[in-house]
Amino acid sequence: MLEETIQRTKAYYCLECGICTGSCPVSRHHENFSPRLMVERALLREEGPSLDDREVWSCLTCGTCSARCPSLVDYNEFTRETRVAAREGGWAGVDTHAGTILAFMELQTGAAGKRDLSWIAEGLRTSRKGGVLFYTGCLPYFGIVFRDYGVDAVGMANSTIRLMNAAGVRPVVSSDERCCGHDPYWTGDADTMKTLAKKNLRMIEETGARKVVFACPECYAMFKLVYPRYFGPLGFEVAHVTEFLVPYAAKGKLAFGERERTITYQDPCRLGRYAGVYDAPRELLTAVPGLEIAEMARTRAEALCCGSSAWVSCTRVNKQIQLERLAEAAETGATTLVTGCPKCNIHLACAARDGDGEEKIEIKFVTDVMAEALES
Amino acid sequence: MAGRQKTSSILAFVCSWYPLAAADNAGVDRCEYSAEATIVPVDCAGTITAASILKAFARRTDGVLVAVCGRGDCHYSNGSESCGIVIDETHEIMKAAGIDPARLRLDFSSDVAGKRFASMVDGFAEDLAKLNGRGARRTAPKRKPPATKRRPVAKKKTIAKKKPTATKKAAAKKKPTATKKAAAKKKPSAKKKTVPKARGAGKKTSRRK
Ligand code: SF4
Ligand code: SF4
């Protein structure tokens, strides 16, 4: 197992340069966490990658280290496979939110019935069959769990549909949709992901969709990068909502009204470093007349992670990363921090709520900003 | 209920104060009630999480019953109220997932009468049987028999405790079933191969040194 992981992730190429640890947002705040040491231990097998090590669960799988590694060691995959082994050995991380979120994901592997779609706002047009499907992911669930955090996740799904409608698209929203399995997958539970993936692929086939649009970059990255590894090429195209809308905005099919404001943009790990989408959200945002983007010091491939991932391990360290990012966003002078990922939005809003109130910056999801700017 | 077939599985989280005393009194008073309920005592209903309930459903339990001390009667301070909040949220999640929220019942009561407890469980069992009859039954058929075989249950739970004199508290301590820990371990979870010990189980141990 360990040997295979080392082979697959090219860990044997490690030069011990320490660039990973130097780049890691967790290591910056947490002296015991070092990706370099994790790899070294695995290679030397002296202490092995100790599966009972709680630091196995501390990595954000943000991809900063892998993006910078001169030897191209895939540290994210290394972490994931270590988690699979740890899980097989009976270990698990500490789930955030008392495990609620991972539990409703597990629920969708079988016991769950047809999803309730009553959250779709009145006046929006959706259909049951058609060429374009909007994959809503966990947004309806997050809407329940994070209501008290001042985050309206259902609103994000509705604003996505509103934008698609404005572009003349009536998306399929299916009650047979299931969680994409991102979080179980990254916490070492590939079986749950596979069960969910099969249901999703069947659901998409049944609707006849040729194109699937995602609001959440994590779902998007799963479909784009992980599903094909397990199930072969997908029979449909995938696009993040920003990628999907840019051509409509460019052709003038989506018209936005004047909005004088300066925003800054948070590149989500999955959309940026994983899927390589940096320009689409920026192009879409700047399609709003008067809207300007003030970039943060660390942006695009260098962007700092929102500080928490896969609903495992949320500690003092994660909070510090989030406050660091909020401070960086505030420094740009922007009034709004726009995120390309609903989860970044949730985690950063949570930190802003917990923080001492110094980071006075509004946090908004990209489709909410765009739908507000629609010329009606 | 005599002769009624076993139709549902019920996981009953029972707060260790009033509700568990009531459950015990049901045994002491020899009240018959549905054998479908597996009683899991919890120290305080305020410790029940949405995850423990959702996981029970994920592993094909038909219904979850949460028996809590009456509002304002929590032995600690606000366990009943916080349990109410958790159950509200869980109901919403169930609705979103297409599981009838009626499959999760919250019973607030500081009444320790065994009879009331027995009829409350029976009432829930009957409602569940109706729900299952509506074609919404999501249980058994797909189960892999060994993975989900529940511990064999006697047809009727007539708790053979012959000490009607025991005080409620003593009775509560001497619950006829396994100890709390053992009972907790027996939660339907644990058996699915791919999931190690249930998430919670690893928590203690995943802390290093
Ligand atoms: S993926 Fe991110 S959090 Fe994990 S070790 Fe690399 S830089 Fe650190
Ligand atoms: S940052 Fe907040 S919302 Fe995100 S996992 Fe941690 S506690 Fe939950």
Image (tube, coloured by chain):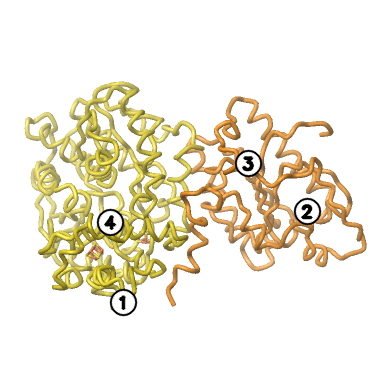
According to the image, label 2 marks what residue?
Answer: B23
Between the C-alphas of marks 2 and 4, the distance is: 53 Å
Residue B196 appears at what percent x and percent y?
48, 55
Say what amino acid the circle numbered 4 marks.
Glu
Q: Toward the viewer: B113 or A183?
A: A183
According to the image, label 4 marks what residue?
Answer: A4
Count neighbours of disc 2 (C-alpha within 10 A) and say few if under 14, some if 14 to 19, many if 20 or more: many
Q: Which structural element holds mark 3? A: strand
According to the image, label 3 marks what residue?
Answer: B63
Say what amino acid the circle numbered 3 marks.
Gly
In the picture, one chain is orange; tell me its letter: B
Between the C-alphas of marks 1 and 3, the distance is: 44 Å
Q: Kindly check if marks 4 and 1 are in contact, taking CB atoms under 8 A apart as contact.
A: no
Say what amino acid the circle numbered 2 marks.
Ala
According to the image, label 1 marks what residue?
Answer: A32
Q: Residue at x 34, y 23 (%)?
A: A206
Residue B27 appears at what percent x and percent y?
84, 52
Both labels 2 and 4 in a single chain: no
Residue A319 appears at what percent x and percent y?
32, 68
Between the C-alphas of marks 1 and 2, the distance is: 49 Å
Q: Quadrant of the C terminus of chain A?
A: top left
Q: Is B182 on the left or on the right of A342, as rendered? A: right
Q: Which structural element holds mark 2? A: helix
Between the C-alphas of marks 4 and 1, the distance is: 26 Å
Residue A244 appears at what percent x and percent y?
17, 35
Q: Which circle's residue, 3 or 2, is located before the other in the chain?
A: 2
Count neighbours of disc 3 (C-alpha within 10 A) and say few if under 14, some if 14 to 19, many if 20 or more: many
Count neighbours of disc 1 (C-alpha within 10 A) and say few if under 14, some if 14 to 19, many if 20 or more: few
Identify the image quadrant of residue A122.
top left
In the picture, one chain is yellow; tell me its letter: A
Of the numbered discs in the image, which one, if any, rests on residue A141? none
Q: Toward the viewer: A328 or B143?
A: B143
